[in-house]
């Protein structure tokens, strides 16, 4: 059922990180729900593309996927458990769901509270745990939050961790000695986050051994592509259609910024493709209160679909006038 992740991005297995990124950007833009409203097929392709990018853009995950295929997460968990590292990495349900429900993510962590032999381990700090979250550009603009479902493992209350009662397997924990206890954690994602930003939640990683402190939980952010704005650092780029007469004579057009519409003054003789900067209308700068990048608006001069006979007459007259001006100049 699951499609090959390389096929989803249309790249060969030998593709470079750059090729993968380029294919992702192209396809994500093509199938973005904003440009394909009510198109289920596009929506499903969009999810596939995002899921594939999430794995293939991460060198470690990509290596594991190449080795184990679809079931790489499970295989990785098993290998980690066998290696005695405990099961600390994050489980994901399936790549697509994170997009389907922005309200919560379903990653769960298995934290060993009983751990290995404590005497040998000493007082060591617990490992950090990472999980990935996707946010829209608007969410990155305003700041948002995600509910993380943590699954903490605790000593089984029935058998006290031995896994058996009077020589029989404990039925509460089925002999594991530990039981899972789910916990929900609301994590705030600050305004201005970028793809690759890591949001730290202190003390929510794996527990330390002995008196060692717990590790931290990190939410690694991916900001999804937007149908209207392209982000470059803290700046945003967009386009605006400008009627040809406004481009020639100067005028004003309404531009959608990420936080509302503004009037943009078009100077006289604005060439097609010219960029106009709207200072402070870009993304918030992470951690710098009130500071924002800029919005660059690229002018697309648009022609009318049809001319009335009267308009045509005026334009013809204008052409004659320009030709006259040109021959007059040549004559000098
Ligand atoms: Zn038990």
Image: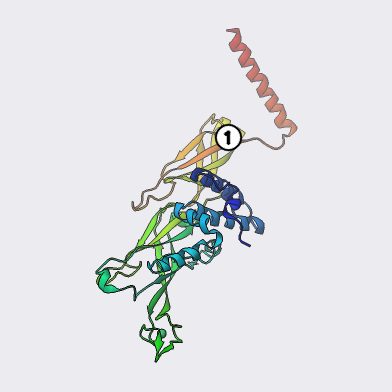
Q: Residue at x 42, y 42 (%)?
A: 279
Residue 218's place in the image compared with 226, above or below, is below
Which residue is the extreme one toward the right? 309
Where does residue 81 sit, x and y in percent of width and height? 42, 68
Packing grade of label 1 (10 A; few <14, some 14-19, many >=20) is some
Q: Residue at x 37, y 52 (%)?
A: 286
The quadrant of the rendering that contains the N terminus is bottom right
Which residue is the extreme one toward the front? 167
Where does residue 77 sit, x and y in percent of width and height? 45, 66
User: In front: 310, or 63?
Assistant: 63
Q: Quadrant of residue 247?
A: top right
Where does residue 212 sit, x and y in percent of width and height? 26, 69
The quadrant of the rendering that contains the C terminus is top right
Residue 84's place in the image compared with 249, above or below, is below
Say which element carries label 1.
helix
Let me know if residue 54 appears in the view.
Answer: no
User: In front: 114, or 79?
Assistant: 79
Q: Quadrant of residue 80?
A: bottom left
The residue beneath circle 1 is 246
Q: Residue at x 64, y 55 (%)?
A: 42
Left/right of residue 283 with respect to residue 126 in the rendered view: right
User: In front: 60, or 175?
Assistant: 175
Residue 243's place in the image compared with 123, above or below, is above
Where does residue 217 sit, x and y in percent of width and height? 37, 64
Let me know if residue 246 appears in the view.
Answer: yes
Left/right of residue 41 with respect to residue 68 in the rendered view: right
């Amino acid at each position: 059922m699951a499609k090959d992740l390389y096929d989803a991005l249309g790249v060969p297995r030998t593709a470079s990180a750059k090729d993968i990124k380029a294919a992702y950007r192209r396809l994500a833009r093509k199938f973005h729900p904003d440009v394909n409203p009510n198109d289920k097929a596009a929506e499903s392709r969009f999810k596939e593309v995002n899921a594939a990018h999430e794995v293939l853009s991460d060198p470690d995950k990509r290596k594991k996927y190449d080795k184990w295929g679809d079931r790489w997460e499970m295989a990785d968990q098993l290998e980690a458990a066998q290696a005695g590292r405990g099961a600390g990495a994050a489980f994901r349900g399936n790549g697509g769901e994170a997009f389907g429900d922005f309200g919560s993510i379903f990653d769960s962590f298995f934290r060993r509270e009983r751990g290995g032999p404590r005497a040998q381990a000493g007082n060591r700090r617990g490992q950090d745990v990472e999980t990935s979250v996707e946010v829209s550009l608007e969410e990155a603009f305003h700041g948002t939050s995600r509910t993380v479902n943590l699954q903490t493992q605790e000593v089984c209350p029935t058998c006290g961790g031995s896994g058996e009662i009077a020589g029989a397997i404990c039925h509460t924990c089925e002999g594991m000695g530990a039981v899972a206890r789910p916990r929900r954690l609301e994590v705030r994602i600050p305004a201005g986050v970028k793809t690759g930003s890591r949001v730290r939640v202190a003390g929510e990683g794996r527990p330390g051994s002995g008196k060692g402190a717990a590790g931290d939980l990190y939410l690694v952010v991916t900001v999804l592509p937007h149908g209207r704005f392209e982000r470059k650092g803290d700046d945003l780029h967009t386009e605006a259609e400008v009627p040809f007469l406004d481009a020639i004579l100067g005028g004003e057009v309404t531009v959608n910024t990420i936080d509302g519409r503004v009037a943009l003054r078009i100077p006289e003789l604005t060439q097609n493709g010219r960029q106009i900067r709207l200072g402070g209308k870009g993304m918030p700068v992470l951690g710098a209160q009130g500071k924002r990048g800029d919005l660059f608006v690229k002018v697309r001069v648009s022609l009318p679909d049809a001319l009335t006979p009267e308009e045509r007459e005026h334009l013809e007259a204008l052409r004659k006038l320009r030709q006259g001006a040109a021959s007059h100049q040549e004559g000098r």
